[in-house]
Image (spheres, rainbow, N blue to C red):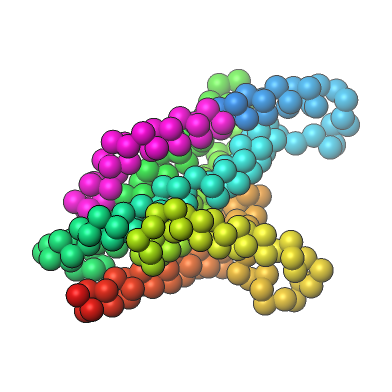
Amino acid sequence: MLNIARKELKSMFASPMGWIILALLTFSFGTYYLNGVNNYFEVMSGSIRPAERIGVTQFVGQTVYGLASFIMLFAVPLLSMRLISEERRSQTLPFLFSAPLSISEIVMGKFLGLVVFLSILVVYIGVMLTTLNIWSDIDFGYIFANSLGLLLLVSSFAALGLYFSSLTAQPIIAGILSFIALFVLMILDRFFAGDPTSTMLKFSLMRHFQSFAGGLIDTADLAYFGLFILTFITLTIRRLDADRLRG
């Protein structure tokens, strides 16, 4: 499993797409971080009443983490779409099945490889925000909660993207399907905002990310993301197992 994860991670850094996505995202996060710091000084420089002021960690953090949750919606399908569909298109999937590995180890290896790559971006954001501590007292708990929430969110994206990648031999189709599904799951709370009792609200990814975005860690949201990831990894395993049985 670890060898598969290492192979996938190396392949992402070996391809121009991996470096381009990494460079664009780090540049975007860095730019929003600097803009957030500048805006903090402009907004909090006396034009607002003291009772209405918020800490620099929350002010800057909500900007950067909010952007990250939105941009990852586009980045993860691009990264996940080739994980299995490329193997199917190049007809190397039978060779992978013949390796001394179980289907579960293959799927988990590919999933972990992508998650480790995405974790680099999550760590980058966290480290960037901790630099605020150089000149101000910051809320490390807020940064930790947001980083954990973002990691769970992108891991959920990766699990769903991996599943769609297992359905087709065309990476582009897998990417488009992943994006559409994730987009719908992200905005479900807006469609059903008028009905707080709606069951559909419980499936909204953004709704479960909101508690982390506020600096809180809710066990119900942890369970949701855990079950979401487990569900799509299991579906991927079942899909590949059916392919292997068909030969």
The region drawn magenta spans 1-29
Does residue 158 appear anywhere in the picture?
no
Residue 100, compared with residue 148, is above or below; it is: below
Relative to 171, is 92 on the left or the right? Answer: left
Q: Position of residue 197 (x, y in %)?
A: 75, 76
Q: Residue at x 40, y 54 (%)?
A: 171
Residue lying at 36% horizontally and 69% vertically, measured from the top left:
236
> Can residue 16 be spotted in the picture?
yes
Predominant SS along the magenta part: helix
Is residue 20 shown in magenta?
A: yes
- As drawn, is 66 to the left or to the right of 94? right
Magenta highlight on residue 9: yes
Image quadrant containing the C terminus: bottom left
Q: How many marks?
A: 0
Residue 90: image location, x then y, percent: 25, 55
- 231 vs 49, nearest the viewer: 231
Q: Determine whether, in the image, residue 28 is placed left or right of residue 117.
A: right
138, 122: nearer the viewer: 122
**160 above or below 42?**
below
Q: Is residue 221 shown above or below 212?
A: below
Quarter of the image holding residue 233? bottom left
Q: From the viewer's perspective, is residue 41 above or below residue 174?
A: above
User: Which residue does the image show at 23% across and 47% down from the upper left?
Assistant: 7
Residue beneath the point at 70% across and 64% down: 189
Q: Is residue 79 left or right of residue 141?
A: left
